[in-house]
Image (cartoon, rainbow, N blue to C red):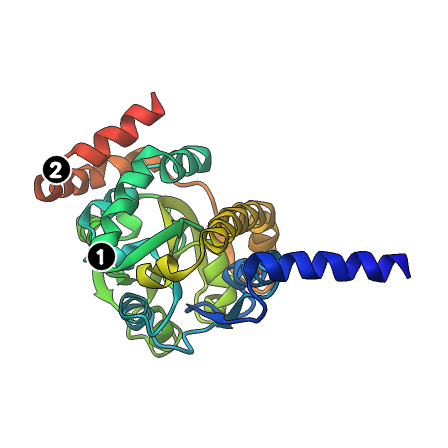
Amino acid sequence: MQFFKALGLASAMALAAFGAQADTNLKLAHAAPETDLQQNLSLFFKEQVEARTGGSVTVTIFPQGQLGNDAAMIDGARSGIIDIAMSGLNNFTGLVPEAGAFELPFMFPSRALAYKVLDGEVGQGVSDQFSQFGLHVLGYPENGYRNMTNNRGPIRTPDDVAGLNMRVNNSKALNDMFLALGANPTQLPVAELYTALETGVVDAQDHPIGIVLSFKFNEVQKYLSLTQHAYSALALVMNENKFNSLTAEEQKVVTDVAAEAIAMQRDLAQEKEAEMIAELEAEGMEVNSDVDAAAFQAVVKPVWDTFIANNGDAVVNAIAATQE
């Protein structure tokens, strides 16, 4: 009996702090399958926000592009049709070009440095620029290091990339990188990529390990080369008006839970990477890690020069200073 009294008191206190009914529902959308770690993050976010607000804020998750592709989700978050969207940071560089610095090839030699930059003053400075587009950045989850897959053979040197019909995302830096390597880059939404690989529209692509597995690209790609040529972050953004409409207590819960969810998802990504590579090998992919990173870095150096010429060197220098 005492337990139920205590439970009732706790519930009453939660309701008093956050309101007597669930009057705010947040629609959270992402493009990844439910087997992806983006869904793990989303479920953690939902459970914890609802628990810590006593139900005054609820979250409905829309995975696998149910509310549209990345561009549509970002537009939806800006307009308020979607409350929270999670998408590759590259998809925001049209709005905030300086965010493209984080996508430059071989920018981050370690995850630790990437996290330090994204979670620190440099990342916050870029995040602040999103507000002019109606977006509040909740943080930068992990997409991971990008690696190349193809159907021609293992990639060990830049010459092995030449001539590949390479699917690329809308990151200018990555487009420029594959052009420098002699590939034929073709922009395609990730939702169309499996079919494009299956039908031979493209014969190669680059993504972090988790995406290769969750989208089942191993079914239509033979070789996985651990080039780790760029670190890719996701951006978890919220409609700014919606965020501002929450009470101060609710805003703190959303902010705190987002940070915890991102930390959890990053940890899972690192813990499971070797396991995911082993699973891809078990399902028939040939995996190689003997990549001449120095040769790749030498070829793609002009990509940095082009970015700096177009966007200035402030963010690039700030990242370098963080590393020192």
Crowd band around label 2 with a 10 angstrom C-alpha radius: few (<14), some (14–19), many (20+): some
- Secondary element under disc 2, as helix, strand or loop, is loop
Crowd band around label 1 with a 10 angstrom C-alpha radius: few (<14), some (14–19), many (20+): many
Quadrant holding the N terminus? bottom right
**Residue at left offset 20%, top offset 45%:** 98
- Asked whether the residues under the numbered discs 2 and 1 touch, taking CB atoms below 8 Å apart as contact, a structural biologist would say no
Vertical order, 238 against 116 (above or below): below
| Horizontal arrangement in the rendering, residue 306 relative to residue 8 (left or right) | left
N-term mark: 2 or 1: 1
- Amino acid under label 1? Ala
Give the number of the disc on residue 183.
Answer: 1
| Horizontal arrangement in the rendering, residue 247 relative to residue 239 (left or right) | right
- Amino acid under label 2? Gly
- In the image as oriented, which residue stretches furthest toward the top? 324
2 vs 1, front mark? 2
**Residue at left offset 37%, top offset 49%:** 232
- In the image as oriented, which residue stretches furthest toward the left? 309
Vertical order, 258 against 185 (above or below): above
- Evaluate whether residue 106 shows in this view: no
